[in-house]
Amino acid sequence: QNKIKALGKHLAPEAFHIALEYVYLRQEKFIRETQGHVFDETDGIAVGMCQVANQTTPMCKNINQAKRYVRVVNMLPELVRMQCSMMGAWGDATIDGKLVQMRTLDFGGGPFANNSVVIVHHPTDTNIAYASLGFPGVVGVVTGLSEKIAQCEKVDDLASGGNPKGSYSGVADVFVIRDMLQHANTKEEALTIAQNAKRTWGVWLGIGDYNSQEFLAMDYQQAHANAYDDKSLPTRTNQSGFKNVAYIDKHPQPSVHPELPDLVKKFYGNITAPNVVKNFPLQTQSGDVHIAIYDLGQNNVFFSTGITDASGINYIRKAYESPFLQFDIESLWSEPKP
């Protein structure tokens, strides 16, 4: 038995890389057709990495091999499933009538929490700057906002078991989200980008925008990308409905868990970004890897990240137990280009 375990530990990285290669081969031609020029960025990362490594890394002895490796690693988000929560509150629900948005990312142990970075992008093919809370070398977006919109995401797990039908033949959702941030001026334009994409696996997306100061939840599946608002979303989540609030908790849907709707009810009419920061993630225990709270009225964003021990498995402190860093959003866009 010990020999089998030792063999499995040795083979696991190779098996995982084979799985990533499989996804890459299924998606390469579709990703090339997106607006984001994703492979230009991954190739640039490979070149920069190998310049620093000075060819001491075996992979860097062949720059094309290094470029391929970085591209393949960027398929990782398509292979993992993350339980997350999202909420958008505006109008009568918030103290100033402006949009407050929450995105929590739950994954469990892994190489992510200790390697979180905020990256500000100034694309050369659009005048919309955007920022992502992500991980080094990962060019897709799991959490982010732009000068026009802010984004949330949650895996589409079904309470009845399983997930909606999907396929790896298409564009991973993290690259579609990147296209939304880079090119959409409104939540409606983001929805159109999603509907026109070659979609793969089911997730819930949340999009709010500065223009309307409102939020929509998107049932994003291979078969369709449909929008839900504060009135229609409870038909899918089985949760209490509140005017001007759309939310989905971290559990498979429809959900029977009361923690998030109880908080919405408690703070309804007085929801602010600081109230959400102090209460919502901690009391729902959602967001172990990282959390983003967007205040589109006051133009602030709050980020927190978890910390694990050296193994990457055991959390020393989860994001919902961690202090938040507050950024003035305009100052993010003022971050100078390299």
Image (spheres, rainbow, N blue to C red):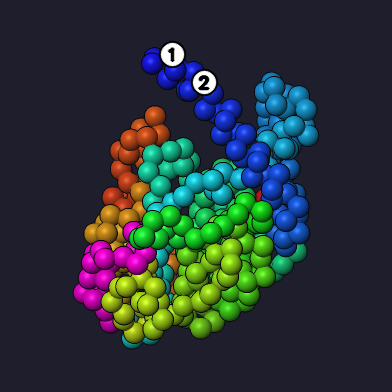
Quadrant of the image for the N terminus?
Answer: top left
Q: Which residues are magenta?
A: 249-270
For the residue pair 234 and 290, the one nearer the viewer reads as 234
Q: What's the amino acid at mark 2?
A: His
Label number found at residue 303? none
- In the displayed structure, would residue 111 be above or below residue 216? above
Closer to viewer: mark 2 or mark 1: 1
**Residue most extreme to the top:** 3
Q: CA distance from mark 2 to mark 1?
A: 11 Å
Q: Identify residue for label 2.
A: 10
Label number found at residue 3? 1
Q: Look at the image and say whether residue 101 sits in the magenta stretch.
A: no
For the residue pair 1 and 27, the one nearer the viewer reads as 1
Which image quarter: residue 200?
bottom right
Q: Position of residue 241 (x, y in %)?
A: 31, 80
- In the displayed structure, would residue 5 be above or below residue 189? above
Which image quarter: residue 261?
bottom left
Which image quarter: residue 297?
bottom left
Q: Position of residue 33 (x, y in %)?
A: 76, 59
* Numbered disc 2: secondary structure: helix
Q: Position of residue 149 (x, y in %)?
A: 54, 71
